[in-house]
Image: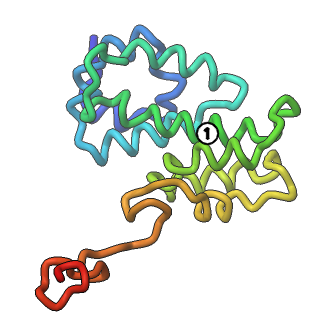
Amino acid sequence: MPFSPEQLMALENPYKDLNADQLAENEDVLNNLSAADKHTLAVKMVTLCPVNELKEFTIRLRAIKSLIPNSESFHQAIEPLVRIKSVLTNLDKPELNNPQEYLQENAAIMRKYPGFTKDMVAMYQQALPKHMDVMAVISKTNKPNMHGMYGHKSTPTSLPDTTAPHSPLFK
């Protein structure tokens, strides 16, 4: 029997309480939570997931991954948070040749969820590479974003007016 939205939100440890079958059974209820409740529940689940169970948790979440992408789904709310935790907890792996580059490749998603990222960095500080200021790397990554090519804001007023009769391009 599916949980009510109130019961889902009241779970003390939704990570443990919702196995793959229960996630699938409650998919409609999860998808119909408000955006804020989806985020709150997703944060709680990912935070409570032990690092050594993260891979299994990712597999479990496939039970609610829709074949049709839906930005309103619970899966879409939780997937980026799982990815952030996974990236941060993999930075100290010896097989990772360039942790800074790996972090930079994933910085955009971390910038999208700055509060969660900061909390995860604080939680796993001891496991992160000692020489790396993770938050600085994330904030300084030169990847295209919503402000233009490399984070510089450009507005139409800062561009030359090529339509004005006085413009050298107009003559």
- Name the residue rendered at 49%, 46% in the picture: 109
Work out which quarter of the rendered image holds the C terminus and state it.
bottom left
Q: Relative to 37, is 46 on the left or the right?
A: right
Q: Of all residues shown, which one is farthest toward the bottom?
A: 166
Work out which quarter of the rendered image holds the N terminus and state it.
top left
Q: Relative to 170, is 120 on the left or the right?
A: right
Q: Which residue is mark 1?
A: 85
Residue 18 place in picture, x, y as percent: 45, 20
- Tag count: 1
Residue 29 place in picture, x, y as percent: 24, 25
In this view of the protein, which residue sits in the foreground, 65 or 10? Answer: 65
Q: Amino acid at mark 1?
A: Lys
Residue 20: quadrant of the picture:
top left
Q: Relative to 117, is 70 on the left or the right?
A: left
Q: Relative to 63, is 170 on the left or the right?
A: left
- Name the residue rendered at 85%, 29% in the picture: 95
Residue 17 place in picture, x, y as percent: 48, 22
Q: Secondary structure at mark 1?
A: helix
